[in-house]
Amino acid sequence: MDEKLTIKPKTVFFKTTNPMRNYLQKMKVFLMVTAMLFAAVVSANAQSREVSGTVLDKTMGDPLPGVTVLVKGTTRGTNTDLDGKFTIPLQPGDQVLVFSFVGFSAQEITIGNQSVINVELDEDIQSLQEAVVIGYGTQDKKEITSSVASISSEGFNKGNFPNPQSLLTGKVAGLNISTPGGSPNAQPTVRLRGISSFGANSSPLVVLDGVIGASIDAVDPNDIESIDVLKDASAAAIYGTRGASGVILITTKKGSTKKGFSNVTINTFGSAEQATNLIPVLSPDEFRARRPESSDFGNNTNWRDEILRTALNGTTNASLSGGFENTSYFASVNYRSNQGIVKNSGRETLNTRLNLSHGALNNRLRMNVNLAFTDTEANDIPGDALLFATILNPTMPVFDNSPEGLLNGGYFQPTGFDNNNPVALINTRTNQTKVRNALYSYRAEYDITDDLIVSAQFSQDILNTLNGQYLSRLDGAPNGGRNNNGIAQQNTYDRINTVISGNLRYEKEIFDGLNMSVLGGVETQLFEERAFGAQVRQFLYDQSWNNLGAAGIRFGNNTNIYSNAAKSTLNSVFGRANFNFRNIYFFSATLRAETYSGFGAQNQTGYFPAFSAGADLSQIFDMGPFNQFKLRGSFGIVGQLPPSPNLAQSIFLNGNRILLDANDINTAWVAPLQTTNPNQFLKWETTRELTFGLDYALFDGKITGSMDYYRRNIEDLLFNVGVNVGQPNPFNPGGSQPNYTAGSIWANIAGLNSSGFEFLMTANNINLGNGFTWTPTAVFTVYKRARIQDIGTGGLTLPEIRRGIPGAPGVNNSDVIRNIEGQRVGDIYGPRLVSIESDGTAVLSTTTPNEFERLGNALPTGDFGFTNQFNYKNWDMNFLLRGSWGHQMLNSFRLFYEGDGNATWNSVITKNTPTNPVISNAPEQISDFYIERGDFLRLDNLQIGYNVPTRSSAISNLRFYAGVQNLFTITNFTGVDPEVRWTDTLDPMNPDQLAPGIERRSTYFVPRIWTTGLTITFK
Amino acid sequence: MLRNIKAICVGGIVGLTMISCELEQEVLTGVTQERLLNEAPPELAEVLKQSAYSRLLNDGSWGSHGGFYSYQEISSDELSIPVKGGDWNDGGIWVRAHRHTWNIDDGGLNGIWDVPFRVIAETNSLIQQFPDVVELSAEMKVLRAFCYLVLLDNFGGGVPLVIETTTDANPPSSSREELFNFIETSVLENADLLTRDNRRSNFNYWNAHMILAKLYLNAEVYIGQPKWTEANAMLDFIINEGPYSLTPNYFANFSAANSNSSENMFTLPFDANNAPGFNIHHMTFHYESQKTFELVEQPWNGYAALEEFYNSYEDDDLRKNNFLVGLQFASDGVTVLRDDAGFDGDPDGVDINFTPNINQLEPNAFRQAGARVNKFEIPIGSQSNLNNDFPVFRYADALLMKAEVLLRQGNAAGALVLVNQVRQRAGVDPFTTLTMDSLLEERGRELFAEGWRRSDLIRFNRFGSPWWEKPNSPATRNVFPIPLSKIQGNVRLTQNPGY
């Protein structure tokens, strides 16, 4: 072999971590350098004929420096200079020139008699799409044998989507993203392949540019290049104990690899949001007609009008990207202002990002820095305001200027229970949250040899949350600020996650046609968190939550002080091997071993293996129209961490305050108490998943897609299981506290079985004539809901877990959701409505909870998304229809307010109440009457865009667009939003996964959002 | 290639080392078991001891809603929670509690179980942790005996006997006799070691005997063998030897500053700031009563006395002030409170008037109906937790218990003297004769809302009798079922007969 060929090529290109692109790059760099060397040799022999020309970027019209120009069939060539110009000497017999450049489609030009050849190279979209991020590297899509979905920025939802998760709604089969209501501060609930845990985290792990567990706040949607979703255990096993709910890998935009090139892109849009789908209630006159005279306050108030507004929102993203000598950069500033449609609610976010890459030592050493800072300020309104805006007596006035009323801030204050003025609530109560996030990640890669690459990454994700709340002295609600002379609180929560990681990759064709890539690595993750809070009351002057010291009462009712901190360590060793035999047979194996300080001493290390294999039958047999017919099967084991690292430890926290001498405050102590029962055996949840899939392509890639069938079996489910206080705790042998002192213990208690079928099909650019093209993409998922197995461990049995209490007034102690061994998670139980007597009394099948029947299930049996992209000349249109089906929901508004039985409140109008209410005494008892099907079809988002043709030397792209979100929803559900409720949000801080399907009365109104904006790129 | 292999090996070794290290979980919040066992601040034993007592005050306890206390009161003829158009329906559990038709999965039953058992957990731990501190062990054993008395009274057998040496994770149900003997032995063996200091919020030499007095008084109910002689002896000891006396003013025992009442024998030392939990004012008063007492938080409009019970008081009985009745005013005493949401048909209209008559238990009780519990002093401006100490054992109870024993033993004259001591203080004419029925009524009037009525009715064989909105109930309802969740948490528990 020629000595020169083994020299690592000198290159100016940045080397990415994408093996597909690495191959391309390597090959091209290699070719280019060899060409240069030969060119040098050849040029010494001065030939008579040469060809020269310029190579341009077809999209941008810019000169492309560094393009390899090679005479086909030879090793002779050159590369373009900074102005994209080249000159190449020819020899007799030279017929074709090959122009190639990383990220662009290669082009072949027949020389003929030409002496000047100008070429425009097209960006190679295909090659970008084919690289799939799989964790600690990328893989060519065709080699992937587990279940992985990949969505690039073109495929994202279009509109005002302020968080990354919602970009994927309806786009990935098996991924349900649900954001019930329209609060600007609501975070979506993300479930991959349904419910995956009871008590541990059920949201997929987020990996942002290789940073495991990064805050989702750290990235603005506009900066995202692509999102890859590791759906099955086989793919996620590389993330061990954190991968059981799936993994979402987010890759941010990179700078250009083109030298001396930079551009500025500004994307700005405004949106107007208005409430839609308001539940009908009695008008003031209808109310007067039905209620006793004493309920008439003589006014006509539309309470929802009083708190709603048209929210005008704006978002601006500005980014600068480019590259120069061995360095590329991407810098962006993103500002989002999102008012809520309810006055005084809103969110403002400023995010900045710098992604920097640099190659040194002839690009054998590559360094990457990603820095992101996010500053968010959120204002929330009391959930009760949303309830009362719907059901408060419409004859009541908004304001009251009497002396008594002025003590309530001039707001009218209704009397009685559960009866408040929503306008007063949103104006006399403040709830602000400030979130600051800094994410920085440094990565270095070094090519030890051509085949062996070592890389190291250090990252920190720092999250600071500050929440402040104030109930004003003028807050006249019964338990509000006025009776306390103002209540102020501040709460902070700070978290630092540090990841130190190193790995070795080895890629080689080990023998003819068999390519192997092996990865081995180690990783340490440190989690530190800290919280502090104080609440005080009794202020002379309202001072919001800025001056807690001004409060006279710092002790007792409605006061609080606390702090806590925790630290834990997760050490991992992992390895992966991928084999590709002639692009026909593929095999992959993964193993991760993890030791976590928060596991019980008895169970500290877990092993998570995975295997997958596939074969593209279209490469073996003639399969007619099929270009790809890759059958694959995969199996993997992944885990899930307990929700807190201290659950296995015998720790005495804070019990009751003890005043040793009742008359002497100086004798106050806090008794140490195990407020959590320790479990020395606590370990990870274990998810075993088997997936069979098919990736297919038809008619030269015109139609592509995949299908997956999975079976998931979770064991050792982590759950805070009820125990009998006072009985011996068998999970804490040798403990000094022999009995359970708390009513529950975190234990690995049960199993969950589920399965499902996922389908994806895209028809690429169907020509509808006259340049009008249509690209429809359909995804759907059919779930077999999770079934609970074997609840019980070590003498604990728990045949059923009841959850989901509708609440006051009158529906306490009546749970609607039962999770029963052998049955499905989220079964809805209650009596059936047998009849309604003439006086409006409901006759139920039973009032004994033990005789309640299964009325349905709160989790969906299917999701679908139907994305449509139309292009016509410079016009494009994109819309998404999506929906879920099979889930049933408790309509709380109907349960509590469909009847006329109570003169306090207004009534909701439904088909049961055309003139008279059906049931006079609601709320009395939950029954099937209030359970509704949640099936829905929603036009989620639609956008029309126009790309202005530009010849400007300064502007390379100008696009105007306009769109709408939530244009319509087709559903039989009569509540606020038929969106799947995966968790119960009654306590937003502790969402309950075992009480799905309840639409709470504090659900934020759903907006329809109209957006218009423009994107402009300067070169 | 060799070098590569070497690098991989080195990496692998580093990795394996990381994995094989056991990771110590650093504890940044709280005290580890090691520290608790090895470092003993001088106050520790006393703090832990009082902590064990303090767990009697937590959720569901005497004077709070949702558990033990609710069931003692609602299942008796003293109090009910009328359902007001859905408000307070709560899945029907309080109607069932009143009608004795509770189900094994009614959530409130757990509270009856948990209140004593969480104290038992801590006493066991202290007995184990401080075996050499004899007085402490003795006191904890007496406290534990009191908890088992509560359990025996409410669940009969069916309760597992967990002591400091129990290691069986699923201890089986004990028999009534086992529990009875355990309680008796615990107190008899340890009372002498207790302090003579009359600290009302702890067990001492004096009030410990009240546990035995209650045990013997109910022995016929508990184990089918009357022990009137033993009960008599205990009560004699308490009355003759103990440091207790009737206070001149009945209500002094229930005032916000009742810690030094000479009549209260064993109390739960509630404190608005340090020992929260007592909120009878929230449980009983109307929402708008917030304005009467200028309460920091809004009451719940729940508990109301049965009319018949209210009427069992003579008009000149000072103890009739146990109730709040009539037209209700704001704290200025002038402004009549309004309930804008009064039902159609409420004869009082929107003005709030607590009438002793309650139109029905459910589903549409008038929101203002029913006499409310006003036995405990509610100072103007009270927080949602009260400062009053809750009397569990009271000297007047001891006197009436003694009277009962004498009456049952045939000494009506002796009984009459004791009962009339109590009646005299209440400002009513002394009885000239005494029957079991009139004694039971007197106990009701005197001990209203103190949590003893259920137990008394059972002992007088009246718990199954019908009263307002409650039909006859079978004798099996004299004990509660082992709550479903407890059976699920311990497969070796045996359900009580009839459930």
Image (cartoon, coloured by chain):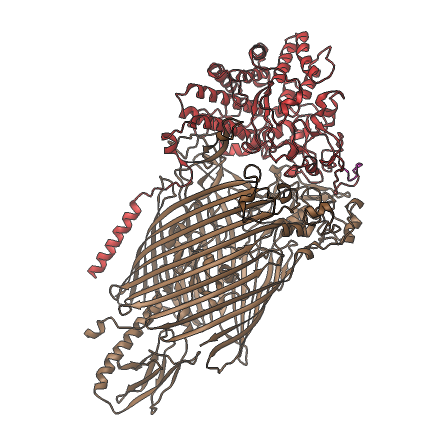
Give the answer, above or below, for where A512 lies relative to B45: below
Task: Residue at 63%, 46% (x, y): give it.
Answer: A473
Q: Which residues are magenta?
A: B346-351
Q: Residue at x 52, y 24 (%)?
A: B147
Q: Is residue B116 above or below residue A684?
A: above
In this picture, residue A38 sits left or right of residue A199: left
Residue A633 makes an appearance in the image? no
Chain identifier for the red-coloured part of the image = B
Q: Position of residue A288 (x, y in %)?
A: 79, 50
Taking depth in this image into account, of A424 and A675 the one nearest to the observer is: A424
Above-or-below relation of A986 to A166: above
Q: Nearer the viewer, residue B146 or A535?
A: A535
- Magenta span main SS: loop
Q: Nearer the viewer, residue B381 or B44?
A: B381
Q: Which of the 4 quarters of the picture holds residue B212?
A: top right
- In percent of width and height, residue A836 lies at 73, 44
- Tell whether position A782 is magenta: no
